[in-house]
Image: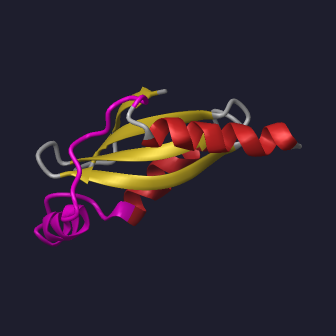
Amino acid sequence: MMRKIILPIAALALAGSGLAAPALAQGRGDQATARKEMNAGNVMKLRDIERIVIPQIEKRGENIQYLTPEFDEVARAYRMKFIDNTRGQMIWVDVDARNGRILRISK
């Protein structure tokens, strides 16, 4: 029981420390920029991308949980963060925001 609690906390601490794989460019304006790009028809709605990507990643393991997205306006891509609670490991999924295609999965 204790291990189930400690591993996710340790993984999140590692991710927040900067020792995990570097994220795509991010900033406070991510949400506003993503909305502007979506309204202009340049990128898909985040909810539509999540409907495509989340099931694909969750089927890789039974205890994988989606955490949050980050938008990179230059690459027009989302970095979607997941945690594998079984292994206590972060999973980053880079997704093309124009078509919802997975570009890269890194741990």
Q: Residue at x 52, y 49 (%)?
A: 54
In this rendering, position of residue 6 left or right of residue 32: right
Q: Nearer the viewer, residue 107 or 43?
A: 107
Q: Is residue 37 above or below residue 77?
A: below
Question: How are the residues colored?
Answer: secondary structure
Q: Is residue 18 above or below residue 16?
A: above
Q: Is residue 101 magenta?
A: no
Q: Quadrant of the N terminus?
A: top right
Please provide percent x and percent y for residue 69: 39, 54
Q: Nearer the viewer, residue 86 or 99?
A: 86
- Judge whether residue 84 can be spotted in this image: no
Q: Residue at x 43, y 27 (%)?
A: 106
In this rendering, position of residue 84 left or right of residue 32: right
Q: Nearer the viewer, residue 29 or 52?
A: 29
Q: Residue at x 47, y 38 (%)?
A: 15
Please provide percent x and percent y for residue 86: 73, 34
> In this picture, which residue range is highlighted in magenta?
19-46
Please provide percent x and percent y for residue 66: 55, 51
Q: Is residue 35 magenta?
A: yes
